[in-house]
Image (cartoon, rainbow, N blue to C red):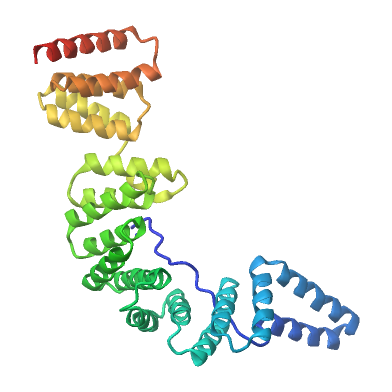
Amino acid sequence: MTEAVTDSVPSARVGRDRIDTILNATIAILLVGLLAFGSYFALNVWTTRRAEYLARPTARAVENVKAKVRANPNDPNLRVSLGMALGADGQFSAAVEQFNNALTLNEELVGAYRGLGLVAYLQKDYDAATNYLLKIVELTESSEYQDVNNSREEALFTLGIIAIEQKNYEDAVGYLKGALRIRRADSDTYYQLARAYRGLGEVDAALEQLDNALAFLNGNFPEALFLVGELYMEKGDEVNASAAYAQAARLAPDADPPQERLAQFGTAAERLQRSRDALDNGDIEMALNEAIIADNLEPENAEILKHYASVLVVRKNDKAALAIYKRVLVLTPDDTEVQDAIKSLEDKLKKAKKKQ
């Protein structure tokens, strides 16, 4: 969240008030250039490197915020902003200094603890990150302002992820439920809560949370669908697992994990043959399951769909059979056999409706 998961939180942005890392590097290059090639060459090296640095959007943001800090050095919020900008530019070690500078000016500044927590998280110093994030939870305990609530929700969410990483699944459930009490319609939180329940071995509870995650994004959440597939496989349900993997693969065609999982089901042709053999042996449920899996593996295979529909007819599931035959007709619009099957089923369903 192997899971096809991205568990990272928004990038931490950190920084330093004085000469930044890039400037230190360019000064070193300047000195080397003076010794080896003379001052003219060294000056050009310095100018080129500095121009390359300033060409980055994040670097320009750093310089802009630094100018504001120089004008207002005792503004703790500007110090936090500088830390955020520097962190976005990848200067993590400098950031801690900026966030600590902010805390020197205001020891209860939530934004500074947020920055410190995110930096520690990104550096995988989970104990430090937990301490900073718990401080945010403490500071926001009684406040109901929206911006404060946002910080509290983010802190609880990140604490939940850290707890999952450390396999403290019960703690993760508590943190993530706390985040959901602040923001109910957050698919990412439901997804992470599902991961926590999976860690506790509560598969059905995990699936319930994934249903919530998918509902808020109209099913457009390939990581959640992949985890649905994993959970159904743990339950021994190949039908639902293959359906979930197939949906994940369609939404994320370049992602390897869903394709790798689908490959474990064999080929659609093999599943189709299993379905035919099961039908010949009178095992209708197995025939249906194998037909569904074959369809999940190759959803635009007319041969599979025709067989799938015929199994549903034998099973006396005429509405579902009609729907499958209509899918076949889209693929093979001139197929008279399919046209006749559709007409027959429509007539049968009309007669049944009149009798009701």
The answer to whether residue 226 is above or below residue 38 is: above
Between 137 and 346, which is closer to the camera in this rendering? 137
Task: Tell whether 158 sits left or right of 31.
Answer: left
Horizontal and vertical percent position of residue 243: 29, 39
321 to 293, vertically: above or below = above
Q: Nearer the viewer, residue 120 or 313?
A: 120
| Residue 38 in sight | no
Q: Residue at x 13, y 30 (%)?
A: 285
Q: Would you identify the image quadrant in which residue 336 lies?
A: top left
Asked if residue 278 lies left or right of residue 298, the reply is left
Figure label count? 0
Q: Position of residue 163 (x, y in %)?
A: 30, 73
Q: Which of the 4 quarters of the picture holds residue 171?
A: bottom left
Location of the C terminus (image quadrant): top left
234, above or below 33, in the image = above
Q: Position of residue 146 (x, y in %)?
A: 40, 68
Q: Residue furthest bottom?
A: 104
- Residue at image x 36%, y 10%? 335
Quarter of the image with the N terminus is bottom left
- The x and y percentages for residue 128 are 39, 84
The picture quadrant where one finds residue 182 is bottom left
On the rendered structure, is 185 left or right of 9? left
Visible residue check, residue 245:
yes
Seen from the viewer's position, the closer of residues 98 and 293 is 98
The residue under the point 19% across, 33% down is 289
